[in-house]
Image (spheres, helix red, strand yellow):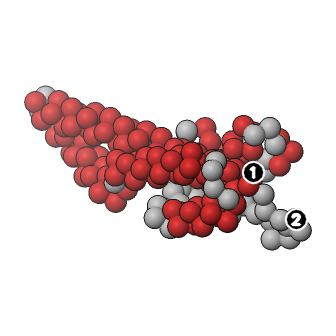
Amino acid sequence: MNHIAADQTYPRTKQEAMLDIKHAVLVHRLNERFFNRLDAVLGGIGMAGGSAAVVGLLGGSTNIAAVAGAILATLSIIERTVVAARKAEIHRQGAETFAALEVRAQSLQLEEIDAELASTKVRFPDGLEGMGWVAYNRNLRSAGLLSSVVPMNRWQRLLDACV
């Protein structure tokens, strides 16, 4: 996600490059947090569904057991498709890699920072669509650049609330 304006008329600065690195760290941390929470929610639903199935079978209620079985089957498909724990781990690695770059970047020239930033970005997924804008606004706020914060749509505000 590149937030540099296409019509930018001044040369890029090292401060902007550092903000881009901080943005990448934050994007990955927020995605890691989201996927860890999603994994926990799916696990909780799985435990509740499994318990309901056992209670239904032991209590002789085939309806409860059938509904719980359907919930567990659906949950299994979602877990196999999303693989939230694995995505959280990938984003944790991304955050650590960009954080290490942030430390090294203090002693690098702008061109070197941009080259390392570009080569590091291709190694990790972008994450959820919309999370980049959440990170963008949080990054700007933390840098005191409140006038540059952009409005977010409902999806982005929901993600912001979840992380």
Callout 1 crowding tier (Cα within 10 Å): few <14, some 14–19, many ≥20: few
Image x and y of residue 84, in percent: 37, 50
Task: Return the residue nearer the eye: 106 or 21.
Answer: 106
In the image as oriented, which residue stretches furthest toward the bottom?
Answer: 6
| Front-most of residues 153 and 29 | 29
Q: Residue at x 86, y 70 (%)?
A: 7
57 displayed left or right of 160: left
> In the image, what residue occupies the spot 75% across and 40% down?
143
Residue behind mark 1:
15
Instruction: Name the amino acid type tagged 1.
Output: Gln
The disc placed on residue 10 is 2
| Mark found first going from the N terminus, 2 or 1 | 2
Q: Amino acid at mark 2?
A: Tyr
Q: In x, y percent, where is residue 100? A: 51, 47
Q: What secondary structure is marked by label 2?
A: loop
Tell me how many marks there are.
Answer: 2
Rendered residue at 53%/56% (across/down) = 128
Measured as percent of width and height from the top left, residue 36 is found at 41, 41
Q: Quadrant of the N terminus?
A: bottom right
Q: CA distance from mark 2 to mark 1?
A: 13 Å
Question: Dot 1: what SS?
Answer: helix
Question: What is the crowding at mark 2: few (fewer than 14 residues within 10 Å), some, or many (at least 20)?
Answer: few
